Amino acid sequence: MNRLRRILGSDLLWSFTRSPGAMIAATVAFGLCLCALFAPLIAPQNPFDLASLDLMDARDPPVWLSGGDHRFLLGSDSQGRDILSAIFFGARISIGVSLASVALALVIGVSLGLVAGYFGGRVEAIVMRAADVQLTFPAILTALLINGAARAVLGPGRVAGSEFWVLVISIGLSFWVQYARTVRASTLVERHKDYVAAARLIGASAPRIMFTHVLPNVLGPVLVIATINLALAIITEATLSFLGVGLPPSQPSLGTLVRTGNDYLMSGEWWIVFFPGVALAALALSVNIIGDWLRDALNPRLR
Amino acid sequence: MSRAILSVQNARRLFDVSKPWLERRLSGEGRRYVHAVEEISLDILAGETLGLVGESGSGKSTLGRMTVGLLAPTAGHIAFEGGEVAEAARAGRLQMIFQDPFASLNPRWKVVDIVGEPLLARGGGGDVKQRVAELLTLVGLSPVDGEKYPHEFSGGQRQRIAIARAIAGEPDFIVADEPTSALDVSVQAQILNLLRDLQRRLGLTMLFITHNLAVIRHMADRVGVMYLGRLVEIAPTRELFAAPRHPYTRMLIEAIPDPHAPKRDRAPISGEIPSPIDPPPGCAFHPRCPLAFDRCRRELPKLIGGVACHAVDEVEPRTASPGG
């Protein structure tokens, strides 16, 4: 009750109700997340259920065009799959991959940043040089590299079914640097503050000081980066899937849908690529806008 | 005379402020060190308050941090009741009150967790909440303040919280590092009286660090005067203020405004404290000293009979009134 009142009375909510952009973005993102979460319940068709697909329904245009079928609001693809249902299920996978990979990057980056900042010296030099080296490669290239390596290690037979986790690991490992750098910088400031000295004085262990004293004080900027990275992860996943190293067509993410639909663009069946593309753009954009708003709202100098 | 609870023997502390390795190679420069504390020996007696005064950069905070084990001496030894300082710190017998109450309390923690942490660290168990409430009452706050966060308090109240945390683990020895210099003048006295009151009630030994002579006069039983990392004079408070012997102590006391003689001619403290990276040869104070002679520039004075000064050694101007 008390906590609820604190949230309702907070500056953050106040700032939220005064930025229409953030409110629209939050509505869009929340709506898409709900569709993704409840896809099996609300989607008109299960695109994974091959028995329900009929090739006779293939390439139907959206319902408002001539030749449209009322069963396929946004049209159907070359397999007779409902585009709207495919978008719901695709968003489910896209959001799942990005959440899991950002969580992975967060855990790796925050831990390494804390350790580097708190201990300094050689540990810091090794971690931060590794981060610098990785930063010279674009994230998508790192993800491609890790993806390729994982596939080579697993072998083609075993990759099937584990694409999801291969994607999560490759995106997660390409995003940790930003967290590590941010957390290290804040930790360098925090570890010289007297509350850390007071904790050391009573014999608190280094992990205890790092995770219970320092971590809560360095987490603010990290959450902002995480939100913005969520959008980036959605895009990266889509890019990888579009390039064909992501999820297979049998388990399509939004990126996979765009890739398969891309082949029909020239033959006039624009809806197969257009609607998944719009959904992808709306998702990434709205998450990004929320991240930007959060960054401004949490920055005391901009208040 | 009571026994020494903490004894510092020839403690030194250097801080490495060298440039990075590559830059040193290119410019042919050696390593550089700040000599924060140099060859200090002193005993702190059980139950007393030892004051430590000196200008900024004189090494008093470094010495304070060494006595509770937050910094290790580069050379020399510090013993707490004959044992290791680190050992005593782990047992919760040493505590510290910091200068800035805005940095010494974790802003993300509730007061009850901040004050209760030393209790939990010692495996206190029992009713930590109950004990924290008692402690908060003891330092003049309300038990319900435990549920608040530090930012909800004023500087003076925060310092009270810091004091509550310091005494929570029932330590024997507390270092107070300029506990009032970040506070408004109006609340300084309250905090000082609270500290003195608690010290008497709990039988604490205290090392009280400040640059404010009026504060030290109010708080300390004995006073040590530091200059550029060295102890230049140590004496019982009354004696030190009545008859300061070291020329530096005399300059410091001279500089106290006297409400009874506001127009009195006072010799101001001249010059700056030299760099602790390259302390002057001989007595570190000689560039500013009115009594300096040849020997002061060559030879480091030893602490003899509570004062480290060649001029005092040779003529013992103990009876000379301050400022002549």
Image: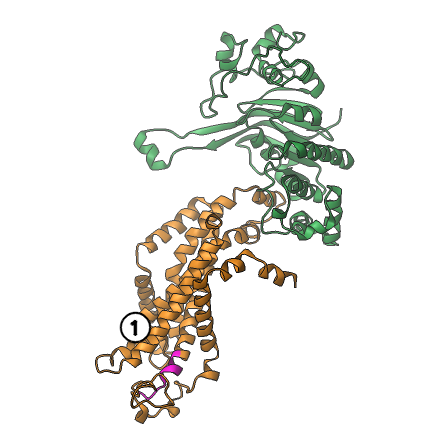
Chain colours: A orange, B green
Residue at 44% from the left image edge and 67% from the top image edge = A24
Q: Position of residue A194 (x, y in %)?
A: 57, 41
- In this rendering, position of residue B142 left or right of residue B159: right
Residue at 34% from the left image edge and 32% from the top image edge = B24
Q: Is residue A294 visible?
A: yes
Residue A25 lies in the magenta stretch: no
Residue A84 lies in the magenta stretch: yes
Observer-nearest of B221 and B151 = B151
The quadrant of the image that shows the N terminus of chain A is bottom right
Residue at 42% from the left image edge and 58% from the top image edge = A292
Observer-nearest of B189 and B133 = B189
Q: Residue furthest left?
A: A266
The vertical placement of B92 against A14, above or below, is above
Q: Position of residue B103 (x, y in %)?
A: 57, 42
Specify the segment rendered in magenta.
Answer: A79-87
Q: Is residue A247 visible?
A: no
Callout count: 1
- The residue identified by callout 1 is A242
The vertical placement of A156 against B130, above or below, is below
